[in-house]
Image: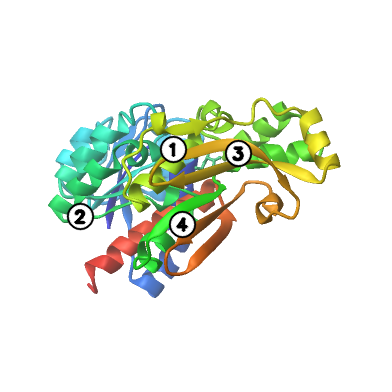
């Protein structure tokens, strides 16, 4: 499978590391082999090579901060735009791992549409296009007979979307509620152990949990984007941010956390979604509530279904390999859907 990556930050690098480290196993277990033929970034430059880029050299250049450190190779093109790479028509799938923009979803949205139009499968970790324009992207993918998958957008590689769209395909999912942002859950957990808000946020950034601009995490917008994805992609809703009631954790002080603890409670940023609307709000949960014991960057979701009642999934919500693994899972699903080769 030939891939173009848009973005090469924490998630893109995590995915590349997985391809590097699991190449033999993936070939043996799944007959899966992938080549990264193009990478476009806003800050490091762009590289394209039809026969595949050298992944260790790509990672090394990225660690050095600029693709000018990537060695010359026969057939290597430098500085191509995403449009030029898509127009070359050689990629099987476009992998969108650039920073999320929950206001306009751009520039990723236009690139996704271009790739679908060119007949490429689309895999996203970028939440913007799925949260803001899922219905149009889905329709475009169907019209072109290609797949759009976005496991990484909600709870990293914890298989929320696979569970809902594949395993629970025969169920109606009526609502979802849980902890959907790793950064804020990490901060709240660390603050309970006495760390300052600033110190915990800095750690969350260093660990690759936070968005490029962490304001979206701490003010609840990242979780709100996930609420939109759940509502629009799983419940068939057409919600926008204006339909949601959103707040974050910035108003919660160390004193609030201590007071909650003394009362046998814990603060959690709770997100909930139905087809009619949704909210993101910090809540004081009694310790007996199962969500109260979900700590660190771990996320949890309970989906209410018509046939099976409540189903709860707990697992990684953010992180380099945790999110890179979701992209791999989506690509494997795309390969499986294409049938035996
Ligand atoms: N910034 C996000 C989080 C990354 O902290 O949950 C995963 O979507």
Q: Nearer the viewer, residue 244 or 187?
A: 244
Disc nearer the start of the sequence (2/1): 2
Image-quadrant location for residue 196: top right
Label 3 beta carbon less than 8 Å to ligand 1: yes
Whole-angstrom CA distance, mark 1 to mark 4, is: 15 Å
When the figure is inspected, residue 84 is found, relative to residue 333, above or below; the finding is above
Whole-angstrom CA distance, mark 2 to mark 1, is: 24 Å
**Residue, disc 2:** 146
**Residue, disc 1:** 225
Q: Residue at x 64, y 26 (%)?
A: 250
Label 2: state its secondary structure.
loop
Q: Is residue 9 visible?
A: no
Disc nearer the start of the sequence (2/4): 2
Q: Which mark is residue 160?
A: 4
Asked if the residue under mark 4 is in contact with the one under mark 1, i.e. CB atoms within 8 Å, the reply is: no
Q: Nearer the viewer, residue 22 or 171?
A: 171
Mark 1 is surrounded, within 10 Å at the Cα level, by few (under 14), some (14 to 19) or many (20 or more) other residues, namely many
Asked if the residue under mark 4 is in contact with the one under mark 2, i.e. CB atoms within 8 Å, the reply is: no
């Amino acid at each position: 499978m030939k891939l173009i990556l848009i973005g090469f930050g924490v998630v893109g690098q995590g995915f590349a590391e997985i391809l590097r480290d699991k190449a033999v196993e993936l070939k043996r277990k799944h007959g899966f082999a992938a080549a990264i033929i193009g990478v476009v970034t806003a800050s490091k430059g762009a590289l394209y090579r039809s026969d595949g880029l050298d992944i260790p050299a790509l990672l090394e250049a990225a660690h050095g901060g600029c693709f000018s450190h990537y060695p010359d190779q026969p057939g290597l093109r430098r500085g191509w735009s995403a449009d030029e790479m898509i127009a070359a028509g050689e990629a099987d799938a476009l992998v969108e791992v650039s920073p999320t923009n929950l206001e306009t979803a751009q520039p990723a949205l236009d690139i996704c549409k271009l790739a679908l139009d060119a007949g490429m499968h689309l895999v996203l970790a970028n939440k913007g296009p799925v949260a803001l324009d899922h219905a149009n992207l889905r329709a475009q993918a169907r019209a072109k007979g290609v797949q759009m998958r976005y496991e990484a957008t909600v709870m990293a590689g914890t298989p929320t979307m696979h569970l809902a769209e594949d395993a629970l395909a025969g169920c109606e999912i009526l609502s979802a509620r849980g902890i959907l942002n790793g950064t804020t859950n990490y901060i709240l957990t660390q603050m309970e152990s006495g760390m300052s808000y600033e110190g915990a946020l800095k750690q969350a950034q260093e660990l690759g949990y936070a968005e490029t601009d962490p304001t979206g995490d701490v003010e609840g917008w990242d979780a709100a984007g996930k609420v939109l994805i759940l509502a629009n992609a799983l419940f068939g809703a057409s919600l926008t941010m204006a339909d949601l009631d959103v707040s974050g954790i910035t108003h919660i002080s160390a004193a609030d956390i201590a007071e909650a603890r003394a009362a046998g409670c814990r603060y959690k940023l709770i997100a909930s979604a139905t087809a009619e609307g949704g909210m993101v709000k910090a809540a004081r949960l009694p310790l007996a509530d199962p969500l109260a014991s979900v700590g660190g960057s771990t996320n949890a979701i309970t989906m209410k279904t018509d046939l099976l009642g409540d189903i709860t999934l707990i697992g990684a919500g953010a992180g380099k390999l945790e999110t890179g693994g979701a992209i791999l899972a989506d690509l494997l699903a795309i390969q499986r859907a294409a049938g035996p080769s």
